[in-house]
Image (spheres, rainbow, N blue to C red):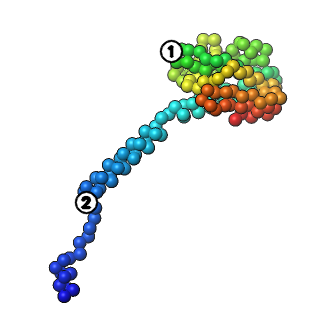
Amino acid sequence: MRKRNRERFPCRHRGFTLIEVISVLIILGIIGLIIVSRISTTEAYLVKSQMDIVKAHLRFAQSRAMHTNSDWGIKFSGTRSQGGKTYSNYWLFDGDAPDTPVRFPVGGDGEYVVVFDDDSIGVWPLSVGAEVVVEFDQWGSPGASDITVSLTNGSDITVTKNTGYMD
């Protein structure tokens, strides 16, 4: 009797129906769109890259001080506007004249980094909260106390006393 039932009702290999497959694909597509939309904002990466540019400029001033045996630094001086954007403004200076910009060996890209006519630099969207002067001596030290460059996005660049380490 059992043998007859097997012959009568052959074993079928069951799979997913077309509706089930389409439903799973639609759900995966929606989840993928949500994930992509959350990670595709680049402003956080843009601010981080601008912080890295500022740190590189600080390291350049430190290196210049150590190689010329004289004081060099960077003065952060609030903001300047150009082309409808407000840029954080700073410049490299020789220790004898902190209010006189010295040309950085960089060029502006016109959108995120600008070199103004007076040789100062502007970065966007990074915003420095207050005027700060970071000056390095011939050993690369910023002095006997930490110097903090406060940014309006809540992060800071700290130049460590005596060593000039930047964090």
Answer left or right for 84 relative to 154: left
> Dot 1 lies on which element?
loop
Q: State the residue position of label 1.
A: 83
Q: CA distance from mark 2 to mark 1?
A: 58 Å
Residue 135 placement: quadrant: top right
Whether residue 75 can be seen here: yes
- In the depicted view, which residue is nearer to us: 66 or 150? 150
Residue 14: image location, x then y, percent: 26, 67
Q: Quadrant of the C terminus?
A: top right
Residue at 76 percent of width and 13 percent of height: 97
Residue 21: image location, x then y, percent: 29, 56
* Lower position in the chain sequence, tag 2 or tag 1: 2
Residue 162 placement: quadrant: top right
Q: State the residue position of label 2.
A: 17
Q: Is residue 46 above or below residue 120?
A: below
Asked if the residues shown at circle 2 and circle 1 are in contact, with their CB atoms under 8 angstroms apart, the answer is: no
Q: Is residue 96 above or below residue 55?
A: above
| Residue farthest to the bottom, as pictured | 1
Question: How dense is the environment of label 2, judged by Cα within 10 Å: few (below 14), some, or many (20 and up)?
Answer: few
Question: How dense is the environment of label 1, judged by Cα within 10 Å: few (below 14), some, or many (20 and up)?
Answer: few
Amino acid at dot 1 = Gly
Whether residue 92 can be seen here: no
- Mark in front: 2 vs 1: 2
